[in-house]
Amino acid sequence: MTETGAAVLSARRADDDDLALLLLIRHFELALLDLFGRGELNGTTHTCLGQEYVPVALRRLLTGADHVFGNHRGHGHYLARFDDPAGLLAEIMGREGAVCGGVGGSQHILRDRYVSTGVQGESLPVAAGVALHLKRTEPGALACVFIGDGTWGEGAVYEALNLVSLWRLPLLVIVENNGIAQSTPTTRQMAGTVRARAEAFGVRHHGVETSDLATIRDELAPLVAAVRAGEGPLVVEFATHRIGPHSKGDDTRDPETVRRARDNDWYRLYGEADPERFERADQAQRARVDAIVREVSARPPSRWRP
Ligand SMILES: Cc1ncc(C[n+]2csc(CCOP(=O)(O)OP(=O)(O)O)c2C)c(N)n1
Ligand SMILES: [Mg+2]
């Protein structure tokens, strides 16, 4: 699970809505890298290329009452929650219509019950507090946090796990284990496993080794229902792959590792499973993102009104 690219992912089934969302996120991320390459964006960005299916799979297991915490690689987390690529792009480009008035940028988004942070591990203690509030005031709702494998190096993760387990709080921790943290392979920085660490706190752990949305939802539905029912927190660890660089142009991996990641890309697997439908959906989302990029790029700069 912790070895870079170790999991062999298979992907076959997605309905039209899921496929459209997967491809929207894919083309959104590719457009960002293109905009950066052309000097059209400031700051930084981390794309979720290769990992799009994780939030897409989860979206049907979450409700509007749940709180979602994204991370530095969070565009897919946001787009799986809100059908708002123009608002997010405007935020990243600092243009009118930006979700957070252009002061949050790529990593720091706040909207309704969604928040993301670029500070690794920051979200867990906050989500633990939110989960406590939900348990007391809105039973049945949960807090869902996305973190990477590298974020298990942060002490705040363990303080939060301790309390959420002790107090049986409705916290769902989604680990996107892509086998690497920036340029450090997980095998070179993590002793033991995510599973053993979760279980050390008495927190249940479930590993996901597929990118097939239907299988993931079938596996997770009863486990998420148990979190809602007050049976305590859950860690779900996805064995996934980063297809692109950590941020922009900073991929330090050897070509073989990158090739293995690309071989397991849901985009390739779904494309092979149903080529004609995939091609149509792919073109539609590519065109949608192209139009959004043109339209948002032409907007005036955003203004932040506190
Ligand atoms: C507290 C903190 N330390 C360092 C960083 C710089 N940083 C940003 S992403 C990252 C690696 C994160 O790795 P992982 O959690 O595996 O997520 P991934 O990038 O692989 O999705 C680092 C070190 C940070 N954002 N926050
Ligand atoms: Mg990682």
Image: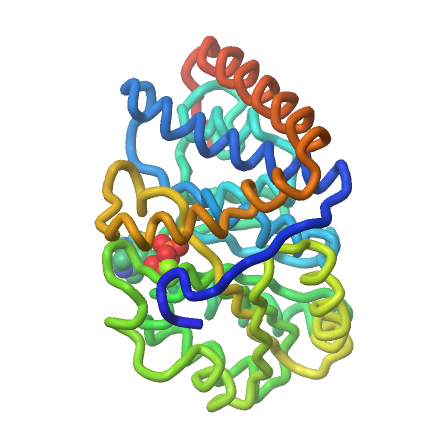
Q: Quadrant of residue 251?
A: top left
**Residue 127: image location, x then y, percent:** 53, 66
Q: Nearer the viewer, residue 247 or 267?
A: 267
**Residue 94: image location, x then y, percent:** 40, 24
**Residue 72: image location, x then y, percent:** 40, 49
Q: Name the image colouring.
A: rainbow
Q: Nearer the viewer, residue 78 or 55?
A: 55
Please say whether residue 194 is visible from this viewpoint.
Answer: yes
Residue at position x 28%, y 64% in the image:
185
Where is the N terminus found, in terms of image quarters?
A: bottom left
Ligand 1's image quarter is: bottom left
- Asked whether, in this view, residue 122 is left or right of residue 205, the answer is left
Residue at position x 62%, y 28% in the image:
282
Residue at position x 32%, y 54% in the image:
257
Where is 9 relative to 207, above or below? Answer: above
Where is 76 relative to 66, above or below? Answer: above
Q: Residue furthest top?
A: 298
Q: Nearer the viewer, residue 140 or 252?
A: 252
**Residue 134: image location, x then y, percent:** 68, 68
Q: Quadrant of residue 211?
A: bottom right
Please say whether residue 120 is visible from this viewpoint.
Answer: no
Number of numbered discs present? 0
- Asked whether, in this view, residue 127 is left or right of residue 196, the answer is right
